[in-house]
Structures are given as structure tokens and as C-alpha cells.
Image (cartoon, rainbow, N blue to C red):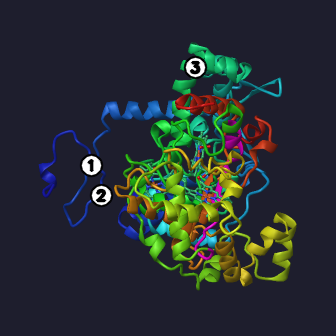
Amino acid sequence: MMKHETIETNSGLLIILTLAVISIGGLVEIVPLFYIDGTVEEVEGVRPYSPLELRGRDIYVREGCYTCHSQMIRPFRDEYLRYGHYSLAAESQYDHPFQWGSKRTGPDLARVGGKYSNDWHVQHLVAPRSVVPESIMPNYPWLLDNELQYADVEARMKALKRVGVPYSETVEEYRANVEKFGEDVARTLDIGRARENLVAQAQAGNFDGNGARLSEMDAVVAYLQVLGTMVDFGQYDEGHFAQFR
Amino acid sequence: MNNPSDKKQGVQTTGHVWDDDLCEYNNPLPRWWLWTFYGTVFFAILYWLLYPAWPVGSSYTKGLFNDITYTVNGEEVTTHWNTRALFMRDMQSSPAAVRQREFLDVIAATDYEDLLADADKLAFVRSYGRGIFGDYCAACHQTGGTGIVGRYPNLSDDDWLWGGSVADIERTIMHGRLGYMPPFRETFDAEQLDVVAEYVLSLSGIDGGDAAKAQRGEVIFKGMAGGCFHCHGADGKGLPSQGAPNLTDSVWTIANVPAAETFDAKKEAVKGVIHNGVQRQMPAFGERLSPVEVKVLTAYVHQLGGGQ
């Protein structure tokens, strides 16, 4: 048996064993989630972000919006009444990193998609107090001024693919996506067509109200407008999601 | 402890000695600490028994609290303790939910006419409605529904784009609206724009204009050159089916005419609207809100000012 003294006088060994002991706490909580049924609910509609939404998400993270906004509605009555259906694990399965959070200086944004018009978002992000006089949210006028950089969007998608997001590179992967998400969505997940898709979505949506250019605002608003809208909760009965816990 | 001979009487050391004389006390743990520790161990065991805890294969131990009951499609479901089941139970049978439902059921069963005539029910509509109006509508229409000229219409006056009956308001909330007027920047030259604006201002009797210009504007407004009458009506009184406002009253929703001091400034405001057109969207709330919430909001908006 290893002696107390051996460990105590050997700092390398001490570090390794300390790490082993303290990681037990994490492991017993995390590892089972990978094989317990229903950790991630089976639900229709959740898909990875399109290239434009993905860029919007990156900017959301860059600007630190998560320091004031969570994206997780807890299963409590008061949260339901204010924000809508509680968030599902499945809804953030393609989020790396997820944006759950518990810091709510501003409201939760998990279901903000469709709540406001694009116009409102643009105006609110440029000057929040022009629409909500009491707001303490900062102004983000540069989102409208900055041109959207998307030359590296393929690389960003590939990076996410590596951690398990089903963006497709090969024909087989594309076919698998068609099977899983349908043809329209599968097309937006194709890395080879990412830039083309990004521009097409921005032009069709005209999220920033200026059709002539592609600004960071286009991407952020496209992202905000999709939050929480993927699952059609109408098709599940009230108790459906409770059975996964 | 530099000198082992200084050792306090009765205190043990761990037995190791470094650098000839460096040793370490091995004091017993304080009693309060030790008992707290045993307490947490006991708590953990109790917790494992009562609540879902240990993973077993692809499932887990469900704990002894197997009595969370809620109803799905008329059938009672009893299940183990978990936040989603607690949520269902809370939504269905917590005292606050039950009290609120009493009111909401009454509202759901009352038609608009009785609702707006009954002081008690209206009081509930006001207090509950103010809350959900704050959550969903005030970011655009502002607290109290006063709106922002040019962007979000005032809901507290008796002037309506899409009609102020409960049926119209309910439709607006359920399905949203797209207020659209085409830009005329390509259609009109400067002179035409000017005279049409003169005519528009003359419709609501604003002084300071040039009658001859207004007359020329009228021809454009009512003729195919402008085609304004298609949406605003030949009399300029607006067509609720198009969401086109009445231009003959003193209420302005896009062009900020009242805030402009001089006639020329007022004209510029109107010219801006005609030149650039309008495109603004009221989102649809039919999916986000429950039918009774829509009803409360409809009644709330109706009673804010000028429901018809």
C-alpha cells in the first residue's frame, strides 16, 4: 500500500491523485447523462443553426450578451407565464457552448424569436432606450455599421462538426441530413454551400432593413428571430416532456 | 516547530520529519466539524432514498417521493419527484393557479359585450391585462399603449388603422398586421410630391397651404397618377381593410405633423412618408398566447381608449 508519506513528499503524484479525487464529484454527475435515456428528449424540429444564424450567435457571444441574458426557461409556473414553455435539453443540443446561464439582468431570450419584428430588434439594439425608456441595456450601434465577415464561416462550421454538430461535407452526410431534417434544412447545413446560403438568407430576410448591405445586424437579428421557435409545442400533449425526467 | 523538543505536551505529530527537525501536528478534528461532516453524510443517504439519485443502467433510482400527481388529457398521472412533474402539478393545482383560473374561466365564458359592460370583470381585465401587455406589447406600443409616432401606433386613442371593434383588435393580435404603403420616390417628381403633400395637409384643415397647389394634388391623389385613393379612399378617410389611416382627422401615426411647428415643416414630414413609403409589422401572437390571454388583451386594448 502506498504510504501517506510517499504521496506527501512527491508533489507530482500528489497533484495527479488530487485531481483524480476531485474529478469523481464531476464524473458521477456528468457521465450518467450520456447513457441515461431521455437526457436529451426526442423532439421534432430542432436543427443546427444556418450559417447566417451561426454568425449571429458568434457575435452574440462576442458582445457578451450572455452576461445579462440567459437562454433557459426553467420549469416553473412564473417562468412559463412570462417566457413560454420551459426549455428542453434537445433545444440546445447543437449549442457549443450553450447559453443557458443564470444571470438575468435582462429577460431570458430562449423564446424571443418571433416576439418582435426585425425592425424592433434593429432599433432596440442600436438604441434600447428609444423603445424601452427604462432599459439599462447598452447601445450596440456598430452592429449596423460593421460589415458582416463571413469568409471563415466554413471553418466555423467544420469546427462545430468536429464536436458533433451534423453539418455536412460529403454526399453521404448530406443525404443523412436530408433524411433527418428534410431537404430544405439539409441544404443550409451543407458546408460547401455555406457562403452562398448565408448571403441568400440575409437577402431574403433583410433583417437589418437595408437590403443593399450585409451587416452584423443581419446576422444577430436572424439569430434572435430563430431562438425558441424550432419546436412546435402544439403537437405534443401537456405531459409529454415530463416523461423524460 | 523548529525544535522537536518544544513539542506541546499531549499533541501528536504525523510522525514525518523533514529537514532534520520539521514535523507536523496531527490534531484531532474539532468536534463540531466532525459532527457536521457526519450530518452531511446522513443527509446524503436520506436524499438518495427520497429523491432520484443513482444511475442504474440507462435509468436511475426514482426515490420514495412517488406521489407527484397531475392530469394529462383527463387521466391522472402519478410519477416520481422531478421538476417537470412538479411544474405540471403547479400549473394545474397550485393555489395561485387555481385562483387565477377561476377568473380566467369566467372571462373565457363571457362574450365581449358582457365583459366590457361588467365592472368587476373589467377590473380583472385591467389588472391582468396590464401585466401581459407589459410582457408582450409595451416594448413596442409603450406602457399604456401610447405608441411612438412613426413606429408603433397609439392604441389609447379612438383612431384605428385596422378597425377598433373587438373582432378587428382580436384579429390584429392573433394574426399580426403588415402596414404597407409603397414608396413614391420613383413615381413623383419634386413638384408632384409637393402638391400631393399640400393636398394631404388640406384634408385635415391645416392652415397655411396654397389652395391652388392642393387642388393639383387632389387630382393626383384621386387619379391614377398617385392612386392614393385605392388605399386611403377617395375622400381620404382611410380603408381599414388596407390598414390605411384616415387623413382627414388630426391624428397622425407616421408623419409627425403635430410636432412640426411651421407649415413647411409639417409638409416635409408628410413628404417624407410619401417619398419613402411605410413598411411596419405587428407580429402575430396567436401561437404565443393562449385564447383567453388574447381575449383579455383584446378587451384591455379596447378599453384603453376608443374601442368601437
Q: Which residue is mark 1?
A: B13
Residue B147 in the image: x percent, y percent?
Answer: 48, 45
Amino acid beneath label 3: Leu
Taking depth in this image into account, of B145 and B295 the one nearest to the observer is B145
Image quarter in which the C terminus of chain A is found: top right
Amino acid beneath label 2: His
Give the residue at x 68% y 53%.
B234
Give the residue at x 65% y 27%.
B91
Q: Which chain letter matches label 2?
A: B
Say the numbered circle drawn on residue B303.
none
Taking depth in this image into account, of A158 and A117 the one nearest to the observer is A117
Query: Alpha carbon of mark 1 to alpha carbon of mark 3: how far?
Result: 79 Å
Mark 2: which secondary structure? loop
Specify few, some or many for label 1: CA neighbours under 10 Å numbering under 14, 14-19, or 20 or more: some
Query: Alpha carbon of mark 3 to alpha carbon of mark 2: how far?
Result: 82 Å
User: Which residue of the protein is positioned furthest toward the front in this rendering?
Assistant: B212
